[in-house]
C-alpha cells in the first residue's frame, strides 16, 4: 500500500525548500502558482513607496523627514500584510493573476501622473521629472530582479551564506595563511610602484569600480565552470538509512521511510536546468561570500601597510603632486585607499580561482555544502514519493 501524506505535510515540505533557498525543488514549480505570490509583497512595497513618496516633494526640513518616515512605515506594513495574506492563500486565480500584472504594468503611468497632481511645476516627461521612459525602466528592472531573486531563492541563499560568515572566515584565514606568501610576492612590488600610485591618484572612483567589477566577473565565470563539475559529482544515495537521516528535522520526519523504500532504494531524481542552476547558486553564494571576506581582510592589510610604510613625503614624491586625502579620514590618502581596493579585488579573484583547485579547500568548504545538497535531493525524493498519494488533512 503506498504511503500517504497530508496536504499540510506536503505544503510544509515545500516551505522547507523555500527556507533553504531551493524553491525550484517544488514539483510543478511555476510562475503563477509559486513565483508570483512570493513576488507580490515586494511589488506592492515598491509600488506603494513610489506613489506615497510623492507627498514629500513639496515639504522641506523636519516635515519632510517625518513624512519620509511615515512613507517607510506604511510601505513596510503593507509589505508584511501582503506577505501574510499570500501565505494563507493557496493559489492565485487566473483573473487575480491578470489583475496583478496589469496593475503593476500601469505603475509607470500612474506614478508620473500622480507626480503631476502633487507638483504642478513638474511634468511627467519634463526635465525635472523622472520621465516616463525612466519609470518604465525602473519598474521593469524591479520586476525582473524580483522575478530572478524569487525564482531561485536568492534572498534565502544570501542570508544562509551570511550565517556561515564566521565559519567561512575561519577557513579563509587558514587558507589565506598558506596563500599569502605567494600573493604578497606578486603584489607587494606593485604596491610600492610610483607609477601605480600616480594612476590610482588620477583614476576616478567609477573607473576603479569597473575594474573591481571586471575582477568579479572573472571570479563568477571561473566559479561557475568549477561548481558545475561539483554539482555533477553529487551522489544521490537514496537508501532507507540515508533518507531517514536526511528527513530528520524536516516536515517529512514522520514519514515511514521503510514503507517508502519497500522495493529498494528510490531511483535517482533527475534535475531540469532550472533546478541545476538553483543548486549551483547554493554553492556560488557561499563561494562569493568567502571571496568577499578575503577581500575585506586584504583591503585592511594594505591600508595598514600603506599607513605604516608610505609616509606623506614619499607618497607625494611618487604621485608627483600634493597628496589628496579623504574627507572623512583626513590622514588617509585617496590613492592609498584606491590601491588597497585594487589589490583587494585582485586578491579576492586570485584566491577564489586558485582555492577551487585546492584539495584542502574542497574538503573544508565544499564537503559540508555538498552534504547539504545531497540532503536536499534526498528530501525531494521522499517528497516526490509521497506527494502523489496526498490525502486531505
Image: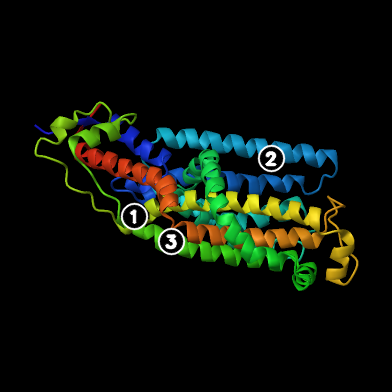
Question: Is disc 1 placed on a helix, strand or loop?
Answer: helix
What colour scheme does the image use? rainbow
Asked whether residue 45 is in view, the answer is yes
Residue 108 lies, in percent from the top left, at: 60, 58
Position of the N terminus, as image quadrant, is top left
Q: Residues within 10 Å of mark 1 (few under 14, many from 20)?
A: some
Q: Nearer the viewer, mark 1 or mark 2?
A: 1
The quadrant the C terminus occupies is: top left
**Mark 1 or 3, nearer chain start:** 3
Which comes before the other along the chain, label 1 or label 2? 2
Quadrant hosting residue 131: bottom right
Which residue carries the number 1 mark? 231
C-beta proximity under 8 Å, tags 2 and 3: no
The residue at which mark 3 appears reads as: 224
* Residue at the image point whose x is 28% and y is 39% from the top: 379
Relative height, residue 12 to residue 339 (above, below):
above
Give the residue displayed 43% in from the left and 45% down from the top: 364
> What residue appears at the point 59 percent right and 67 percent down from the top-left corner?
214
Q: Earlier in the sequence, mark 2 or mark 3?
A: 2
Q: Nearer the viewer, mark 2 or mark 3?
A: 3
Q: Position of residue 201 (x, y in %)?
A: 80, 67
Q: Which mark is residue 71?
A: 2
Foreground of the two, 138 or 311 = 311
In this image, 98 relative to 170: left or right? left
Q: CA distance from mark 2 to mark 3?
A: 40 Å
**Structural distance between the alpha carbons of marks 1 and 2:** 45 Å
Looking at the image, residue 129 sits to the left or right of residue 111; the answer is: right
Amino acid at each position: 500500500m503506498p504511503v500517504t501524506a497530508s496536504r499540510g505535510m506536503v505544503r510544509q515540505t515545500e516551505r522547507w525548500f523555500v527556507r533553504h533557498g531551493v524553491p525550484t525543488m517544488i514539483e510543478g514549480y511555476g510562475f503563477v502558482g509559486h513565483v508570483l505570490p512570493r513576488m507580490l509583497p515586494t511589488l506592492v512595497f515598491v509600488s506603494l513607496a513610489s506613489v506615497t513618496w510623492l507627498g514629500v516633494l513639496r515639504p522641506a526640513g523636519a516635515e519632510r523627514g517625518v513624512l519620509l518616515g511615515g512613507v517607510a512605515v506604511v510601505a513596510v506594513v503593507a509589505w508584511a500584510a501582503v506577505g501574510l495574506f499570500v501565505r494563507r492563500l493557496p493559489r492565485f486565480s487566473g483573473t487575480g493573476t491578470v489583475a496583478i500584472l496589469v496593475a503593476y504594468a500601469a505603475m509607470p503611468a500612474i506614478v508620473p501622473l500622480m507626480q503631476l497632481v502633487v507638483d504642478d511645476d513638474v511634468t511627467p516627461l519634463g526635465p525635472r521629472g523622472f520621465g516616463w521612459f525612466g519609470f518604465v525602466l525602473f519598474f521593469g528592472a524591479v520586476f525582473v530582479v524580483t522575478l530572478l531573486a524569487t525564482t531561485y531563492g536568492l534572498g534565502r541563499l544570501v542570508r544562509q551564506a551570511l550565517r556561515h560568515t564566521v565559519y567561512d572566515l575561519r577557513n579563509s584565514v587558514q587558507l589565506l595563511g598558506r596563500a599569502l606568501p605567494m600573493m604578497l610576492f606578486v603584489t607587494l612590488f606593485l604596491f610600492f610602484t610610483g607609477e601605480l600610485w600616480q594612476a590610482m591618484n588620477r583614476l576616478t572612483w567609477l573607473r576603479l569600480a569597473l575594474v573591481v567589477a571586471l575582477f568579479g566577473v572573472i571570479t563568477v565565470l571561473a566559479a561557475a565552470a568549477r561548481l558545475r563539475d561539483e554539482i555533477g559529482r553529487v551522489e544521490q544515495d537514496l537508501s532507507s538509512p540515508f533518507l531517514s537521516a536526511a528527513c530528520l528535522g524536516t516536515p517529512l520526519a514522520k514519514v515511514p521511510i521503510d514503507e517508502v523504500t519497500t522495493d529498494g532504494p528510490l531511483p535517482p531524481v533527475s534535475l531540469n536546468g532550472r533546478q541545476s542552476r538553483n543548486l549551483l547558486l547554493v554553492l556560488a553564494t557561499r563561494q562569493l561570500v568567502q571571496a568577499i571576506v578575503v577581500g575585506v581582510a586584504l583591503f585592511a592589510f594594505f591600508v595598514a601597510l600603506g599607513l605604516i610604510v608610505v609616509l606623506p613625503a614619499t607618497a607625494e614624491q611618487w604621485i608627483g603632486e600634493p597628496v589628496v586625502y579623504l574627507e572623512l579620514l583626513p590622514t588617509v590618502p585617496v590613492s592609498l585607499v584606491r590601491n588597497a581596493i585594487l589589490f583587494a579585488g585582485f586578491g579576492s579573484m586570485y584566491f577564489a580561482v586558485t582555492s577551487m583547485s585546492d584539495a584542502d579547500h574542497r574538503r573544508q568548504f565544499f564537503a559540508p555544502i555538498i552534504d547539504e545538497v545531497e540532503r536536499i535531493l534526498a528530501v525531494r525524493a521522499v517528497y516526490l514519493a509521497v506527494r502523489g498519494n496526498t490525502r486531505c488533512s
